[in-house]
Image (spheres, rainbow, N blue to C red):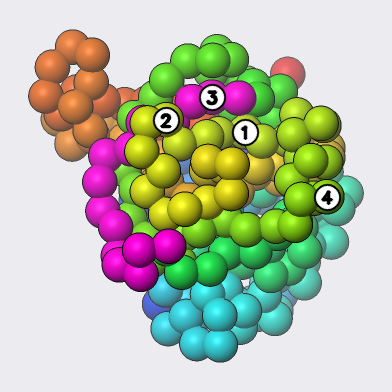
Amino acid sequence: MTRIGVVTFPGTLDDRDAARAVRLAGGEPVSLWHGDADLHGVDAVVLPGGFSYGDYLRAGAISRFAPVMGEIIDAANKGLPVLGICNGFQVLTEAHLLPGSMIKNDHLHFVCREQVLSVENVDTAWTRDYTAGEHITIPLKNQDGQYVADDHVLDELEGEGRVVFRYEGWNPNGSRRGIAGISNAAGNVVGLMPHPEHAVEPGFGPDGAKGPRTGTDGLRFFTSVLTALVG
């Protein structure tokens, strides 16, 4: 069975949710501790959401130096699939596995809502089970969710097709060009602010096309990486 590591930092909130999503997709979740410089032979890694180290300095700034991150950075640069969700996305930018940075929402308030996303890139390890241009609904909850980068970086992301998701309709945090998620050049590392692990079970996810609380649009993140690894 494909083994997907889920990292826990001090202040991580959504590690159990991410592990459940991996299990529902058909993978085996493996707990990875921030202070343990060992990936235990996992086939991919999820950096889940939360407030690692209390978001001191900047969100994700301290987690970037955790012992486990040294292993993740090295493995990601060699092709290991890595998904950063919310705080995990912030950690990936701090670790320079993804470009740009995350700052406070432009309205300076915490936002929590069901967010529609446009799928822009289905050629990554984490999105191949989606269809380009489709709209999915994923829960969003953040305070430091505004993605920023200079125009050169933004143009590069656009030109190389590395914008993976955009906010559809309302831009909830002021992210440049409505960007909700991006990838590295190889497509094995993806970060996004919304939480796919909260949209994997009928009856608990966002409202779906078939009725209230039927949305499971997030599950395909986790089936995608299983497909990528076995294919």
Q: Which residue is mark 3?
A: 119
Q: Quadrant of residue 32?
A: bottom right
| Quadrant (top left, top right, bottom left, bottom right) of the N terminus | top right
Q: Residue at x 37, y 48 (%)?
A: 172
Q: Where residue 152 is drawn, which disc sits there?
A: 4
Q: CA distance from mark 1 to mark 3?
A: 6 Å
Where disc 3 sits, the SS reads strand
Callout in the foreground (1, 2): 2
Q: Earlier in the sequence, mark 1 or mark 4?
A: 4
Q: Is residue 78 left or right of residue 99?
A: right
Q: Earlier in the sequence, mark 3 or mark 4?
A: 3
Q: Amino acid at mark 2?
A: Glu
Prevailing secondary structure class for the magenta stretch in the rendered image:
strand
Q: Earlier in the sequence, mark 1 or mark 3?
A: 3
Image spot of residue 121 (x, y percent): 65, 25
Q: Earlier in the sequence, mark 3 or mark 2?
A: 3
Image spot of residue 109 (x, y percent): 30, 67
Q: Which residue is mark 2?
A: 168
